[in-house]
Image (cartoon, rainbow, N blue to C red):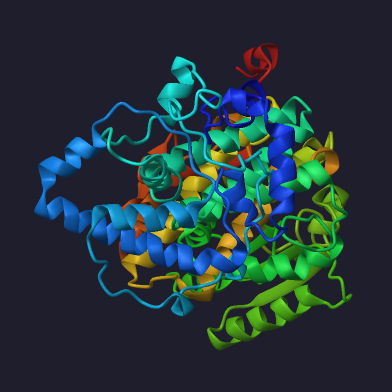
Amino acid sequence: MKRGHQDILHGGGGWYAVAPEMERGKRKTTMGAAEEGGDVDELLAALGYKVRSSEMADVAHKLEQLEMAMVSSAATNDDALLSHLASDTVHYNPSDLITWVDNILSELNAPPPPLPTPQSLPSADAYDLEPLPALPAPATPLVLGSDPQSEVAPSPRDRKRMKVCSSPPSSSTTTDAATSAAAALPVVVVDSQEAGIRLVHALLAGAEAVQQDNLKAADALVKQISLLATSQGGAMRKVAGYFAEALARRIYRPQPRGGVGCCSFDSVAFDDMLHMHFYESCPFLKFAHFTANQAILEAFAGCRRVHVVDFGMRQGMQWPALLQALALRPGGPPSFRLTGIGPPQPDNSDALQEVGWKLAQLAESIRVDFRYRGFVAASLADLEPYMLLDQDADGGGGGKDEEPEVVAVNSVFELHRLLARPGALEKVLGTVRAVRPRIVTVVEQEANHNGGTFQERFTEALHYYSTMFDSLEGGAAAAGADDGGPDQALSEMYLGRQICNVVACEGAERTERHETLAQWRGRMDRAGFEPVPIGSNAFKQASMLLALFAGGDGYRVEEKDGCLTLGWHTRPLIATSAWRVAAPAEDPLSALAAR
């Protein structure tokens, strides 16, 4: 592989050093490797080392012995060891890994300490890693200055890459090559911080390759991302895995079958289940429900007949708290009507009615007059105003002597999906305006995943979801759980499906089109709505709620232009806003005539 192509694939960094002169012996090397057997480990072969899969455990055992021996030698004769490593001699990586390990152990002349037997170490088959495209490996070690025919004068850039160890003039060439590989291996395997930087660069380079429709380079980078991610721990490894999978789906375009990130009809019930675990494992949905309920309660103050339209009913987890708050209201609870909207279920079950029955039982136990209707709609754009209003009277039911209903419309993580269909959002907001609600509560992700180029969208999503995964890890650590339990694992899958939709899908299939609070403010203003400031009481109570949540030290509630945001440290992640139908602009001539 030529250096120019290799630099492009690795973001210009050059993770594996290959001398340009090795191209001359490429054909001979490939034939030699094929003759020596087909069981050579492909991962190490890609790095330039020839190790049989059957010898992996023995090599790992001897490498541990080598490390212990070098530590022992350094403790007894530091000056001699440093002098041994200070030479400027340059050597290429050896191909016969097990041979030079034995040689350097004997040269250090330090008896290896007892170590676990090779049988106790995992075999190469235990690791499920996709191999990188194999690079040509030399059949015999190449050493500078030992053989005039094999001597190569590397360029300054090659010298910088390949100068990984040295030896005194008396050392054997095999020992020099062994020390070179011993110093090079930790850079690839052990240095997780450097690998983390390379991992981020590989992710961004993969997005750039996809945008340029260079699928061959993108495929190679996806394989490298998967390999580099194994050196990371915690949130970084998980985020990289989901983004690598999303890139792979975009490259290969597999047919959706209800898997991770697929927008299939069969995944509705699975999405609801993941949504419930996301609710349990972190405070984002709790914050969304609490702040929206507070705004609705304030709008319902003093009203005897109230009606809430929920654009995303799901399991109805938002409404028990509102029912209880209404039951405790001074002067008694109002008559409460709830209209829940949800998508059709794959098994044609009436999940919305089941949720309504449970809420009705709760309302009866706390003596709240409660009515419920469920609407199944494939899209919110299919709704009409008459569906949301009471059908027995104009403006919301009741007799002439009864107080009209006060309506509130609630949307939590629902409106951004309408942006996938041109005109759908405007249609829904027009329907909402026709209902004449006193308040409209909107909760959306505080991110921009709906504009710019694919690379810009990918970069924004990488930053956003890295912070989301960090918050999940922080909450689990604060709770004293090492892995966070099943709730965290399923919450990560919930976010992973969003990542896959943002990265792998386009057109109408890309429904996770998140926009920032400023963008939503512009859309709502153009649709004829004006903001309703969320009171300071909601801010204080939301802050108290987070203080009770495990890991709350990392979460931050902020007030921004009458809206509330919840973030992790300095990054806002979701935003709650409230709106009402704007009063029509008064005609100056009509106002003058009225005077």
Identify the residue at horizontal 32%, vertical 57% (top origin): 105
Residue positioned 34% across, 52% down in the render: 104
Number of marks present in the image shown: 0
Q: Quadrant of the C terminus?
A: top right
- Where is 401 relative to 121, above or below? above
Please identify the quadrant where the N terminus is shown: top right
Query: Is residue 509 placed above or below 234 in the rendered structure?
Result: above
Q: Residue at x 60, y 52 (%)?
A: 43
> Which residue is most to the front?
148
Q: Quadrant of residue 156?
A: top left
Q: Which of the two residues, 247 or 274, is positioned nearer the viewer here?
A: 247
**x and y, in percent, of residue 281 in the image:** 48, 67
Q: Is residue 417 visible?
A: no
**Residue 582: % across, % down:** 64, 33
Q: Nearer the viewer, residue 433 or 565?
A: 565
Q: Is residue 508 left or right of residue 152?
A: right
Occupied quadrant, residue 334: bottom right
The percent position of residue 496, horizontal first and vertical second, equals 63, 55
Q: Position of residue 372 (x, y in %)?
A: 73, 73
- Residue 113 in sight in this render: yes
Q: Nearer the viewer, residue 210 or 324?
A: 210
Q: Nearer the viewer, residue 377 or 174?
A: 174
Q: Residue at x 53, y 33 (%)?
A: 201
Whether residue 259 sits left or right of residue 287 in the image: it is: right
Left or right: residue 587 versus residue 213 is left
